[in-house]
Image (cartoon, rainbow, N blue to C red):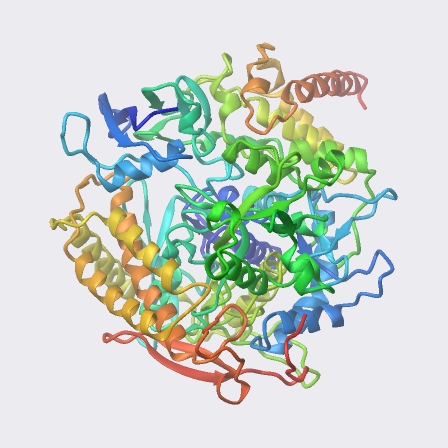
Amino acid sequence: MALRPKAIVVGGGLAGLMTVIKLAEAGVSCQVFSLVPVKRSHSVCAQGGINASVNTKGEGDSPQIHFYETVKGGDFLANQPMAKGMCEAAPGIVYLLDRMGVPFNRTLEGHIDFRGFGGTLFSRTAYAGATTGQQLLYALDEQVRKHEDAGLVEKLEFWEFLSVVKDQEGVCRGITAQDLRSMEIRGFPADAVLLATGGCGMIFGKSTNSVVCTGSAAAAAYQQGAIYANGEFIQVHPTAIPGEDKVRLMSESARSEGGRMWVPRDGKPWYFLEEKYPKYKNLVPRDIATREIYHICRVLRLGVDGQDMVYLDVSHIPKETLDRKLGGILEIYEKFIGDDPRKVPMKVFPGVHYSMGGLWIDYEADNHGDPVADSPRNHQTNIPGLFAAGEADYEYHGANRLGANSLLSCFYGGMLAGPAMRSYMKALDRSCETIGSGVYEAERKRQEEAYTRILGLQGMENPFALHKEMGEMMSENVTVVRYNDKLAATDAALCEMMARWKRIDINDTARWSNQAVAFTRQLWNMLELARVITLGALRRDESRGAHYKPDFPERNDAQWMKTTLATWTPDGPSIGYAPVDTSLLTPEARKY
Amino acid sequence: MATTTVLLRIKRQEGQTAPSRWEEFHLPYKPRMNVISALMDIRRNPVTVDGKKTTPISWDCNCLEEVCGACSMSVNGKVRQACSALVDHLVQPIVLEPMTKFPLVRDLMVDRRRMFEALKRVRAWIPLDGTYNLGPGPRVDPETGAVAYSLSRCMTCGCCLEVCPQVTVISAFMGAAVISQVRLFNMHPTGRMNARERMDALMGEGGLADCANAQNCVHACPKDIPLTESIAAMGREMTRHMLKRLLGG
């Protein structure tokens, strides 16, 4: 069946699929491009839950408090109207997921159960065991399958987004993409395009992210003129288990269910978070917990067995509770480490987890500070017709994201982006069908040539080894503790690596299912984005949220309460700044 | 284990119609290596035991935490997720082969589209009036919720199809995973409303009748999904469904 494509969504995780559902429901036909079958998208890795202040436990929680804690958790760098809109929409979103059949954990009365999470004292997080992301993604995957069956949605899986197609006026009119099996490159017309392509953890080599999370799509759009915002804000999750292939997340929910962090000191357990933060205890926000663990291991040298390790202990919690509420993550620990966390404390260390930064997007708020639901400005990048949502955008989380807000921002982003794209398309004076094939063919040809150049690389460097080197350097210098001299040296080394990239030996010249070629292309994009992250960090001489410089240990609102905006130039990122919308909550000191 | 090197034997094939061959690789041992990290080591230096330079191996993976279902392959003759296959627990040489019940793409990659098509056929979704705000869904008692959760963890990884004697590259049998998904949707209070459509699909070609009760599926499932219970439950529901149809209900 031939579909008449109207909108294109790149990325089949939660934000992408929610947008697809919104578009399909409004009768807009839609093509979804994904590197993997959408059911295998990185959203499956989210564990702990999704936040919504429904106050089912009579604790006095409200969306207003959720909003305040989200903004405070993000160290006042988030644009407040969008964060407010998200928190207010949260209860409705969780109820919608409930109707879709998500097997949330239940109370005795059969209501959705909620648990605590970092940065709050309220039970605000709905969850499905400890594989909430997987369950939410499956629910959306099923709904999209229904629309696919009805002929409104076409999935192009194992296709990689290569670039945006722009017309003479610079308006986005579609994309080019490559079939990663046949390696065919094609142009695809559309009246609006959404990038919901997730985060960029692979830039740090090993992270909690899936292997597709290279940030390559966002980096490609950035090289075509899309602004990348707040790139330097990278969340390093306090509790992960290091592995040879990746670091595996141990959800914050382990601590909401009573897990305690400690290291041995003078022969006794030292519960360092409980001692320093008597109110929030083990549930301080992630950036804070991560810095404490770094301090203990790297400065006090009190890591377990003298190594970069601390204990995350759930062994005092009844087995039945653990299996019911945390089964999924305990299974991961058991399978990959071999110890049973029901009996012995887990050994964990911080790992790169989430990018608060991403493609810059616009929004429209009314004079009460509420987002205007159907505004075409919502989630639109600075390239007209190109939208972004999910971890790929920079909105909502400021300088640090609270746990269980990421799933929420994916849904809310999709619920705004879908209607925004529709409004934008309605207002277009001419559709992509009247553009003519010229712009598509020109862009396709450009991508075909780039592909052929990669196939012809015959130098000495191995792209996978070069990636490992980049990842180790980025993890060492551009994560938890940042120094200007090291950041500058890292940027210089990244530039050298870009020169070395041109001396890659591609080694595999097959024109069928060639993973080396795709990876090499992604590696270039990762290098481009790594520079944005590194230079953003170098410039920002303050400490805020996840960005911490011992030489500038305080938050500096007078100078740095600004969104970082990176624009691509042939000579590297040009960095500018824009004000943050703090119209609803007055910034205050961030204390826990 | 005093291992200092790891030996892998990998089945290579450029494409579906290309001839297959075996290649062997020696790697330095690292603690907590898994099959994926070994494959990653190989592509950073793709040289066989004979010192011959070769192409990096193609394989499918994504989350590396056994929740996405991508990296199913045969490891020492047993189909499983490669990410949770720890080198310390494997006899060497570690033999890697692609699954055989799906069309080959390249090396260890196969095409599992048939599984997603089957989910479409059985209408594996909850019908919604729309995504606008209609309040919470139906209340669910915690026990039923727990059963639904155990069924809902299916990653569409294909292990249960790979071990099923009734499934071949050309057979129509949809396999245990899909039957279990029908059970999941039919037990949901809203999903139940479309139970008949799903049962009709299970009555059709490649449906429940093709199961020969070998029970291999339940042992191969990496998520311990009670697949044989689901098959039995759907068998009982099918009897009721057929009776109803006979009686013109």
Spot the residue most to the front.
Answer: A266
The N terminus of chain A is located in which quarter?
A: top left
Q: Residue at x 41, y 69 (%)?
A: A482
Q: Position of residue A407 (x, y in %)?
A: 61, 56
Quadrant of residue A495 within the rendered picture? bottom left
Residue A164 or residue A343, whichever sits in front: A343
- What is the x, y in percent for residue B23? 23, 24
* Lateral position of residue A23 relative to residue A54, left or right: left
Looking at the image, residue A4 lies above or below residue A481 = above
On the question of residue A8 being in view, the answer is no
Please name the residue shown 38% across and 79% down the image.
Answer: A539
Q: Is residue A376 above or below residue A103?
A: below
Quick check: can you spot residue A157?
A: yes
Please state the horizontal and vertical placement of residue B70, each as a whole percent of the image: 45, 36
Viewer-proximal residue among A307 and A198? A307
Q: Quadrant of residue A485?
A: bottom left
